[in-house]
Image (spheres, helix red, strand yellow):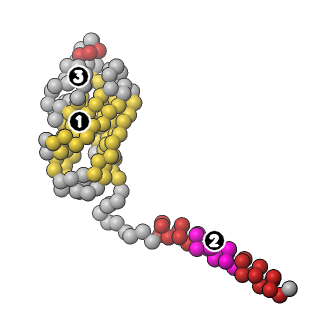
Amino acid sequence: MKSKAISRNVIVVIVVVVILAGVAAYLAQFYLAPPSSSGAGKTLTVNIYIGVNKTTSSNPQDYGRYLIVQLPANATFKAGEQVQIILHNNDTFPNPHVLAIYLNGNFVTTVQANAMSTGSVTVTLQAGTYTISCQIYCGAYHLVVGKMQNVMLLSVS
């Protein structure tokens, strides 16, 4: 009779210890993470907007398309960090906008968004200057440097 009571108590103690260990491990991931003063480990977000300036023409194909890059306030980009690049295509142009991303003139990747939608890509940064260029003809400003070609994205140290 006594051995059944002991084994039942042992099982209860083991179950309680396992549950407490699980809860402690779960909470440790939030409270025991190493502090980061540089922001390392977090993914920054860079937004790119494709806008349409309808004041340049009455023909929709001639509307002045342009890229607007919006960086996080006071952001400094360091090699090894990850950046999520989000393309907001606020254009009704029927084709998708596809932007090539370059590092110091060398192709890295692309990001694409259909009309009135978004697309994104995550890039692990290397030192240098990142630029973007539109890859699909989209109207009068498509080939204009600084509007749709060779637009400064960000700089990494």
**Mark 1 touches mark 2? (CB < 8 Å):** no
Magenta-drawn stretch, dominant element (helix, strand or loop): helix
Looking at the rendered structure, the kind of residue marked 2 is Ile
Q: Residues within 10 Å of mark 1 (few under 14, many from 20)?
A: some
Secondary structure at numbered mark 3: loop
Q: Quadrant of residue 16?
A: bottom right
Q: Residue tagged by mark 1?
A: 100
The residue sitting at 23% across, 16% down in the picture is 62
Q: Which residues are magenta?
A: 13-23
Secondary structure at numbered mark 2: helix
Q: Quadrant of residue 114?
A: top left
Q: Residue 102 location in percent, x, y?
A: 19, 41
Q: Residues within 10 Å of mark 3 (few under 14, many from 20)?
A: some
First in sequence, mark 3 or 1: give its number. Answer: 1
Q: Residue tagged by mark 2?
A: 19
The answer to whether one can see residue 85 in this image is yes
> Is residue 157 positioned above or below 85 on the image?
below
User: Which disc number belongs to residue 137?
Assistant: 3
